Amino acid sequence: FLFALFYLKFRYQVTIQKISMIKKFLLVHLRQAIPFGITGLFVTIYLWQGSFWISIFHVEELVGYFNASFRIIFASFTLSQGVNMTVYPLLSKLYLQDKSATKKLFYDHIKIMIVLSFIVVIIFLFFSKLIIYLFLGEQYNKSILIMQLLAFTIPFVFIRSALERLLEITGNQIKVTISYALGSFVSIALNIVLIYYYSILGASMAMILTDMIIFLITLYPAIKIINLNLD
């Protein structure tokens, strides 16, 4: 960072005043970006630690069965990301211009996520056997029940992602970080206990409970923002 500033000064004759402005600009945006980076760390912990604890308490073969289902479920999360990428710029723009329009768009966003998540859940519940056999083969038949259980995380993830976008456009991204931090710590305890006693079924239950907890923690500040900032 310092080397870059000195380079700008001597290569392009940038003044100290301009360097100071650049530094302030970078520091402001760095502070805003830090919560997103920390959130990404906690997301990684809560999403992938199940495989670690299965390998600690049980045989590696079970890790394969669990990961096979989880990776397919995880791939479905891209649907919510696609909707968020479309809605987020509109929400950000409206929030600066019209709070009532922002509220209406946010509610429409939630409705889309609810409908989309339940469609995806139904597909996984009724076609999990077909999906597993088609993409992985009959040798992964033990992954079918895991996929059906993990499908219940989808509504929490989809709807929560809409709540997270609301918190972000209102400058409350630190609350998203807090929700994932708390969820990660709870997830560690749940995974240790449930995986020890119930193996990959326990890992699935831990994932469902963790997603529900993170959803509820995220929901509380989102409701406050809707009632106070968007009315």
Image: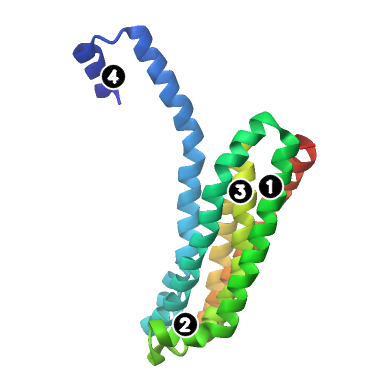
- Compare marks 2 and 3 and give the one earlier in the sequence: 2
Residue holding disc 3:
164
Q: Is residue 128 visible?
A: yes
What's the distance in space between the residues labelled 4 and 3, CA to CA?
35 Å
Q: Residues within 10 Å of mark 3 (few under 14, many from 20)?
A: many
Residue holding disc 2:
131
Q: Residues within 10 Å of mark 1 (few under 14, many from 20)?
A: many
- At a point 62% along the width and 52% down the height, the residue shown is 162
**Residue type at tag 2:** Ile
Disc number placed over residue 106 in the picture, else none: 1
What's the distance in space between the residues labelled 2 and 4, CA to CA?
54 Å
Contact between marks 4 and 3 (CB within 8 A): the answer is: no
Q: How is the image coloured?
A: rainbow
Residue 171 pos. (x, y %):
61, 35
**Residue type at tag 4:** Leu
Residue 88 pos. (x, y %):
57, 44
Q: Nearer the viewer, residue 77 or 204?
A: 77
